[in-house]
Image: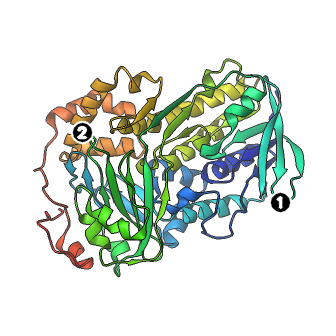
């Protein structure tokens, strides 16, 4: 088969733009179909409500983006993003206690999602080979069960419909994807779907941080304890550009998310530790509270369809959407783009789209199981998954996960491996390796922390008392 010449990407967000970028490296032309008008700067937009909550780009994804778009990390840092070393620059209360602040093994880039999107989008569109069709939505796929030949679209301003012919169509429309409906309309059977829904909800407010705190004070993460049979409550304080803190509070089903400004601080005070509330008690709020319910873990298995059509791929949240609290969505999309780049280096033969889709599915498997297996233990979680790792084998796996978590907060060697996996820099299978089992047996355990590991200079920066905090090394 000849190499495809034109691709249409449905959705111009993070996953769609990265896919468009790698497609433009291998095809003559690429068209991105996007319902919104993409802004010319790091601005919020209607079609991406989750951008009002915290986002992180883990090192596993950041390195891939850097390979695809050299210099992106420097541009983000120059625009005010912060590089957080794990765990040196992070104070975390895990389900098993306070995490020691070990020397950094991995990192995450923290800033507003609009800034992440804009810096990457600006780099990608500068190449000139990608056309963006704004205020346009996909209506249905063209073709048949054997091959997709394009997509029918509709202009949102005038309702005009037209057919965009394409050698390859990529669905990156996100959680609202209508792919399953489109495929059945082509005569294909339903695509298998797993859903693990803990009822996660989010409430976010942005504050002006104390002078110097966004650069000199660690990020803060207070997690729920899934072993306590009550709805989980979480809170984070993450540094952002322009001297701001973004504070996201979240809960599982039944946790009574704060949706009013006056309820935000009391909810933060109700977390397992009051550190988040202490930090924002006297901080100036810059925004009202933004609340969302977008946290279900959902995964499709298109590679299991024996008759998956040529000319069609699905990526990003359209394929696998994770609880955003774990921060794996953006890195997963970056790794998917890398796989697409590698596979398109060779011509796609008949049946090639199914093989590429299977490779993409393998990439999202680690973040899928990490997110779903964590959420499934919370009270009220609705598990509609057939994955045996989330059903019959769950008890044994979770017992081991609890043991790992209890050691990782006190053992630098165990923590290094866990952080490698969490940052999507190492496959999750490493947690079952002989090397890791040996570390579990002989890892050096530091004393259990009874308070946040904050240094005196850090506490002074945010004008807090020690509260019995243990000094960080």
Position above or below: 430 against 176: above
| Residue 409 image position (x, y, % from top left) | 21, 47
Q: Nearer the viewer, residue 419 or 298?
A: 298
Quadrant assignment, res 121: bottom right
* Disc on res. 76: none
Please tell me which residue is depicted at 29% across the width and 45% down the height of the picture: 416
Q: Would you name the residue on which mark 1 appears?
A: 157
Residue 2 spot, x, y in % from top left: 83, 31
Q: Nearer the viewer, residue 318 or 313?
A: 318
Task: Report x, y in % for residue 14.
Answer: 61, 53
Picture quadrant of residue 424: top left
Q: Residue at x 62, y 25 (%)?
A: 303
Q: Residue furthest top?
A: 306
Confirm or deny contact between disc 2 and disc 1 (CB under 8 A): no
In the displayed structure, would residue 394 be above or below residue 241? above
**Residue pictured at 12% horizontal, 56% vertical:** 450
**Quarter of the image containing the C terminus?**
bottom left
Rendered position, 148 above or below 87: above
- Confirm whether residue 36 shows in the render: yes
Q: Position of residue 200 (x, y in %)?
A: 43, 47
Q: Is residue 141 left or right of residue 248?
A: right
Question: Which badge, 2 or 1, comes first in the chain's sequence?
Answer: 1
350 with respect to 396 (left or right): right
Q: Residue furthest bottom?
A: 211
User: Which quadrant: the N terminus?
Assistant: top right
Callout 2 secondary element? loop
Callout 1 secondary element: loop
Question: Is residue 31 shown to the viewer in this render?
Answer: no
Residue depicted at 76% across the width and 51% down the height: 33
Q: Which residue is mark 2?
A: 227
Q: Is residue 91 left or right of residue 181?
A: left
């Amino acid at each position: 088969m000849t190499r495809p010449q034109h691709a249409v990407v449905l959705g111009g967000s993070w996953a769609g733009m990265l896919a468009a970028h790698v497609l433009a490296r291998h095809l003559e032309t690429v068209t991105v179909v996007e319902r919104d008008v993409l802004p010319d700067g790091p601005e919020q937009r209607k079609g991406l409500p989750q951008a009002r909550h915290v986002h992180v780009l883990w090192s596993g994804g950041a390195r891939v983006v850097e390979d695809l778009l050299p210099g992106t990390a420097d541009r983000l840092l120059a625009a005010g993003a912060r590089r957080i070393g794990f765990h040196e620059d992070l104070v975390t209360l895990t389900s098993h206690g306070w995490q020691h602040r070990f020397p950094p093994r991995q990192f995450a880039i923290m800033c507003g999602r609009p800034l992440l999107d804009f810096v990457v989008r600006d780099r990608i569109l500068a190449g000139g080979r990608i056309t963006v069709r704004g205020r346009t939505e996909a209506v249905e796929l063209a073709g048949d069960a054997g091959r997709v030949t394009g997509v029918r679209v509709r202009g949102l301003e005038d309702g005009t419909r037209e057919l965009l012919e394409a050698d390859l169509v990529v669905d990156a429309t996100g959680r609202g994807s209508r792919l399953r409906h489109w495929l059945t309309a082509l005569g294909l059977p339903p695509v298998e779907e797993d859903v693990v829904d803990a009822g996660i909800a989010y409430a976010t407010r942005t504050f002006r941080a104390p002078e110097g705190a966004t650069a000199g004070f660690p990020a803060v993460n207070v997690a729920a304890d899934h072993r306590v049979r009550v709805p989980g409550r979480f809170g984070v304080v993450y540094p952002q550009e322009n001297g701001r803190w973004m504070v996201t509070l979240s809960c599982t089903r039944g946790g009574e998310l704060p949706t009013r400004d006056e309820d935000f601080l009391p909810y933060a005070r109700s977390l397992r530790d009051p550190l988040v509330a202490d930090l924002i008690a006297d901080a100036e709020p810059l925004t009202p509270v933004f609340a969302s319910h977008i946290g279900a873990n959902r995964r499709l298995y298109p590679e299991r369809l024996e008759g998956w059509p040529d000319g069609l791929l699905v990526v990003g949240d359209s394929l696998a959407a994770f609880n955003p609290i774990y921060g794996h969505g953006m890195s997963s999309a970056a790794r998917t783009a890398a796989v697409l780049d590698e596979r398109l280096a060779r011509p796609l033969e008949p049946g090639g789209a199914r093989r590429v889709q299977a490779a993409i599915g393998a990439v999202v498997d680690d973040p899928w199981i990490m997110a779903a297996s964590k959420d499934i233990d919370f009270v009220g979680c609705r598990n509609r998954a057939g994955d045996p790792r989330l059903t019959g084998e769950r008890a044994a796996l979770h017992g081991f996960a609890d043991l790992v978590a209890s050691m990782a907060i006190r053992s630098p060697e165990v923590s290094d491996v866990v952080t490698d996996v969490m940052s999507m820099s190492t496959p999750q299978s490493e947690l079952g390796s002989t090397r890791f089992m040996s570390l579990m047996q002989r890892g050096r355990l530091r004393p259990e922390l009874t308070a946040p590991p904050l240094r005196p200079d850090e506490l002074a920066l945010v004008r807090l008392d020690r509260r019995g905090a243990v000094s960080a090394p």
